[in-house]
Image (spheres, grey):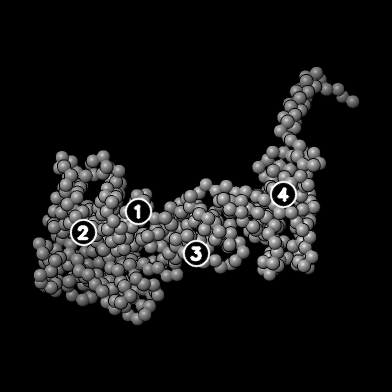
Amino acid sequence: MKMSSPVSRSSHQKAGNGRAGEMRKTRLERRIVGATNRWRFPQDHFCGDLLALSQMCNVLNIDLDEALKNPERLCISKFQKFFAENLTDSSIQSGEADVILECLGYKWELHHPQIFQSETLAKLYLTALIQNAKGPPKDLEKILKAQAPEKIKERSPVKKIIISLKINDPAVTRVAFALALKNLYMNEVEMNVDNVLGVLASAHILQFNCLFKKCVTMMLNRLMPSTIKNFYLAGCKYKEEQLTMACEKWLAMNLVPLVGTQIHLRHIPMHLLHKVLKSPRLFTFSEFHLLKTLLMWVYLQLNCKVQAIPIHETMLAFFSSFPKKCCFLERDAGQTWMPLFLCLRLHGITSGKDLEELRNINFFPESWLIRVTANHYHALESGGNMAHLKDLSTQAMRFGLLFRQEYTTYSERISIYGYFFEIKGIKHDTTSYSFSMQRIRHTDLECPSPICEHSAISLRAERLVKYEIRAQTLVDGRWQEFRTNQITQKFGFIKPGCKSHALKIQTVGIPIYASFAFIFPAS
């Protein structure tokens, strides 16, 4: 037999000493628990009680090696499966409570099958059960035997376990928590907009996934100006992407036509507003309508005591009251909101009256307004060519129609650099619609016409236009989106050259948000 060299023996000895040190360190971390003086490792999972876990596996017929990977999850799922297969509703309702939950200053009496629908309660219960001095095997056997259907009438008494749950979330009220616990016993429990956030928070704390999904579904179907802020923040808090995306899409459609007309506009968080302003789905009647909505949001942030949307002139007078030494956006307060106004397409505001209004309130840096005015001047000088605009998706002039249920036809007329267009929607039958735009003569307008007043008139026979038409509507909680391709076409005065391609759609959704985006390429 070969003998190890002194060097090898020394290195092996050091390694052995290292392992022994590690073992001693591990042993020092163990502590004695229970009436049997068994060892327990202080682990997060299942209290680290290895003997208790082994006994639990024997009772539930679980492989110990599998249980060691994630003890709580495996045992909870086994309990859930057992109670689902062996218990009827009638047997549950007739039995006495097995567990007392102390929470929010109340004592709630619960039953085993319901506890194991909540991962939080199941973990608390199993932890309390293992820490019981008598050990888990007998108690587990009693639970399983006593709850079996054939033993309902002769159930052996099982000691009630007391568990405690501390909740620090202010969203969880006693009423909301009671509704969450009630959902453990009943498939359908009435919730409303006022308490759904509390129930959602309770479901999250209880890790009651079925109820959490019910709450999210209800919130998706109850989006409105009064709920959009809290529902969006809840989606962010619980990382529920489906809810946050739904809130963003809903607000992109309704910021200008609905939310912007109500005091709830004040509560829209800035980061949500910024996302919506950058969204390609954003709907607006015109760029000036969007600007007025954004100005109103700023006004409401600065006037917290205002309880109703003021008239437009009141808002203008407020911004005009600031000293004229610098514009509002360059002030300390205004700089915070600069990113929002950088999302606007100020070149889409072509009315001289509207631009004069912006100069008077001294809100924007003078350089912004000079650049806008200069671009308008060059476009008019070149017959309408928008040389400064290249990308239809991010720079186009945008206009919109909100086609409501009572309409059979609806149209608006717009004027850009002396060219006049009519954007139009037609309802052909209960589910069939079409949207299009066509060039019209200035003589076709009613006189006097607001869009004709102080407006240039182009006599060019043709105008090259690059455009896209979109339509969006909500059906069963999902947004349907329709669009044309980006089309470049010459518009004249004579049919069919005066009319665009029509966007034809089939939908049961109403209202329909139709958007028209276009630029005038050089021609």
Mark closest to the chain's N terminus, 3 or 1 = 3
Q: Residue type at mark 3? A: Met
Q: Quadrant of residue 494?
A: bottom left
Q: Residue type at mark 1? A: His
Look at discs 4 and 2 and give the one toward the viewer.
4
SS for callout 1: helix
Mark identifier at residue 129: 4
Mark closest to the chain's N terminus, 3 or 2 = 3
Q: Is residue 258 above or below residue 275?
A: below
**Label 1 CA crowd tier, 10 Å (few <14, some 14–19, many 20+):** some
Q: Position of residue 420 (x, y in %)?
A: 17, 67
Q: Which quadrant is home to the C terminus?
A: bottom left
Q: Which quadrant is home to the N terminus?
A: top right
Residue 342 visible in image: no
Q: Is residue 21 above or below residue 123?
A: above
Q: Taking 184 as reference, is 379 left or right?
A: left
Q: Residue type at mark 2? A: Ile
Q: Position of residue 490 (x, y in %)?
A: 22, 67
Q: Is residue 403 above or below residue 359?
A: below
521 vs 22, nearest the viewer: 22
Q: Which residue is mark 3?
A: 191
Mark closest to the chain's N terminus, 4 or 1 = 4
SS for callout 2: loop
**Label 3 CA crowd tier, 10 Å (few <14, some 14–19, many 20+):** some
**Residue at 39%, 66% in the rendered image:** 481
**Residue at 73%, 35% in the rendered image:** 30
Q: Which residue is mark 1?
A: 267
515 vs 100, nearest the viewer: 100
